Image (cartoon, rainbow, N blue to C red):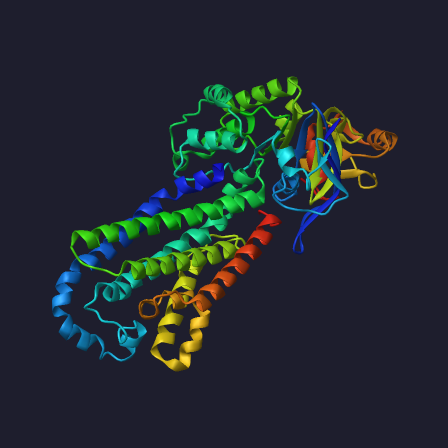
Amino acid sequence: MEVIKIESLSKYYGKARGVTDISLSVDSGEFFGFIGPNGAGKSTTIRILLGLIHGTYDKVAIFGKDIATHQQEILADVGFMSSEGMFYNGMKVKDIIRLSADLRKKDCKEEARRLCDILQLDTSRKIEELSLGNRKKVSIVCAMQHRPSLYIFDEPTSGLDPLIQYEFFSLLRERNKEGATIFLSSHILSEIQRYCDKAAIIREGKIVAYDNVDKLTKTTVRRVTLTGDVNIDNLTGVSQVRKFNGSMTFFYEGDINDLISVLDRSDLKDVMINEPDLEEVFMHYYKKEGETL
Amino acid sequence: MTIFFHELKRNKVSLLIWTTVIVLFVLMIVVIFPEMKKEMANLNELFSSMGGFTAAFSMDRLNLGVLIDFYSIEAGTVLCLGGAFYAAMIGISSLAKEEKDHTADFLLSHPVNRQKVIIEKLLAMMTLIIIMNVIVVVTTALTVLIINETIDWKIFLLLHLSYLLLQLEIGSICFGISAFLRRDSIGLGLGLATALYFFNMVANITEKAEFLKYFTPFAYTEGADIITSGNLDIKYSLIWLTISLVILISGIIKYRSKDIL
């Protein structure tokens, strides 16, 4: 079952581009990564899913229900964590957590207490006294205490120390194993590669790659690193050439036989041809053609 | 009613401060009245000969030796202006502050209907204004009894009804405007309340500017009019009730489909 289904979603802020004609779907139980730098359109997509802003689309549905007509029903079973973690000043952490539960008309005291213990969150402190990391912990508790079927996290780990990041992902994996679907927006590629089954890369408002994380890293693109005297000027499919101390690295996305022919004619001391990791795939999609790293 | 009680809690400190300040001013005015009354023969003459200033505060039509007349000028100014400022401040902050502080993301990502959010926030704003007015009326009435003065209670309540209506209308207008703003703009709310107050003062000074009374809800809070007629001016009250409802409903419609950035 498709938990999130987006077809031809566009959003413009006046003339400024938010997202352009994006389509993707997230299946039930999937751990989905949404990758892109700031301003690419990740938050815009998430805000549309939550009904905070409105876009134009052929279809945007969560749990098979249209977001425009079933918003409340959908949000009752969604846990959202914003990138900023902003709450009402003057209130204590425990009051915010209780307010969130009250807005859902649920008694989540036990689960909230468990999450606060795991995340080492002092619930007696006032919101304005908290660091970004601690505000994020409050967000995590508010997003998870009611045990929803879908978690939407927008840049969740910024500001969290590594130990709490580990606890956070352990919690997510626990929920994911129980059948919950996770939609995680991030620009930290290592966490997407480590935890996500599937990912989409968004660039300038458009989805430029969308597949299983394993497949994304198993593209036909190869990272070539070589040392020696090589002329690749006539080779097509080369991008992001970087030269240093007599060595050269570049991405190659052409006929492998052409590459081998060029290398065969060259005076080489060393050569490595690897699959790129997700970070390199990401950079591959993000660097304009001919641009060097 | 979670949002309603949440709003009351969030605003309790500012309610306490504004109510305390207004009550202290009003009580001070009531308490000094017996002393003022003794000097009033001279003061009436003085107050009625200050030209535009006299007209602006309607002192040419009132006898400052009578408590309700004195109260309508002195306490009326504090209650009208102070109360209007308070109403404008909480009204204009109600929706826009959520966006400015990014707390709207938190609130609206819960399963809450936006219309319900607006209505509960509006009810909370109105409740805060009513609480403030009830406290002012009760403490003032008790003080009048304690100092053993007599006052026309019907006019007293009519005056306070007009102040309450004024505050509810200004609060509602600012609340409606708040739906169109992305930033909390207390300055805009206070500026609007001040401008409307001055329209009324100018309209009092010269007959040529009397048309300005249509442009300000302060027109129907005029103590001299209420005391002489024994009624609220329905014409001005209805005009501003309609204006505030139109702005309020426009705000509600806007907020229901507004992009929360």
Residue visible at 59% across and 53% down in the picture = B254
Q: Residue at x 53, y 27 (%)?
A: A106
How many labels sit on residues? 0
- The image quadrant that residue A265 belongs to is top right
**Residue A194, image x, y percentages:** 64, 23
Q: Please give left or right for residue B170 compared with residue A202 in the image.
A: left
Residue A193 drawn at (x, y percent): 66, 25
- Estimate the x, y position of residue B42 in percent, counting from the top left: 14, 74
Depth check, front residue: A189 or B167: B167
> Foreground: A54 or A14?
A54
Q: Position of residue A31 (x, y in %)?
A: 67, 25
Tell me the quadrant of the picture where the C terminus of chain A can be found.
top right
**Residue A186 in sight in this render:** no
Q: Is residue B118 above or below residue B59?
A: above
Q: Nearer the viewer, residue B31 or A59?
A: B31
Looking at the picture, does residue A170 appear above or below residue B232? above
Q: Residue furthest bottom?
A: B208
Residue A231 makes an appearance in the image: yes
Quadrant where the N terminus of chain A lies? top right
The part of the image, by quadrant, that contains residue A14 is bottom right
Q: Residue at x 68, y 42 (%)?
A: A68
Q: Is residue B122 left or right of residue B66?
A: right
